[in-house]
Amino acid sequence: MDYPEDLKYLDTHEYVRLEGEIATIGITEFAVDQLGDIVFLELPEVSDAIAKGDTIGTIESVKAVETLYAPISGTVIERNDELIDNPDLLAEDPYGEAWFLKVRVNDLDEINDALSAEEYKALVAE
């Protein structure tokens, strides 16, 4: 499995890629693999405010329905509607084209307690 070094990870399997004050949020390859065939994705709307730790949607597979959590607070500036229409794209490119949201971050320091790639890799190996 791939765990890009430029990302920060949550123990709930979301990731964040920070580019200035913009955070790209998605879920990890490990989570996609565990879920299996993904059939439905629910995400917040553009301009919605999200708060770190809050529920930001759900992801449904043939195996389970899982809650998605905000890894950082901010305002949604872009939502990947193509992914909502075609959630099986997650299996192809979870760290690239299959991102969920782009968020203008309120406080960059909120991400400081997230996991590094090595820490996340150790977590999922347990």
Image: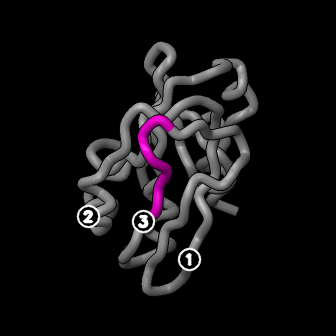
Can you see residue 2? yes
Q: Please give the range of residues in magenta.
A: 41-47
Classify residue 91 as left or right of residue 122: left
User: Hey, what amino acid is under mark 3?
Assistant: Leu
Q: Which residue is mark 3?
A: 41
Q: Is residue 111 above or below residue 51?
A: above
Is disc 1 placed on a helix, strand or loop?
strand
Q: From mark 3 to mark 2, how far is it between C-alphas?
A: 8 Å
Is 42 magenta? The answer is yes
Which quadrant is home to the C terminus? bottom right
Q: Are marks 3 and 1 in contact (CB under 8 Å)?
A: no
Q: Which residue is mark 1?
A: 65
Q: Position of residue 73 (x, y in %)?
A: 65, 32
Mark 3 or 1, nearer chain start? 3
Which residue sits at x=56%, y=49%? 14
User: Hey, what amino acid is under mark 2?
Assistant: Asp
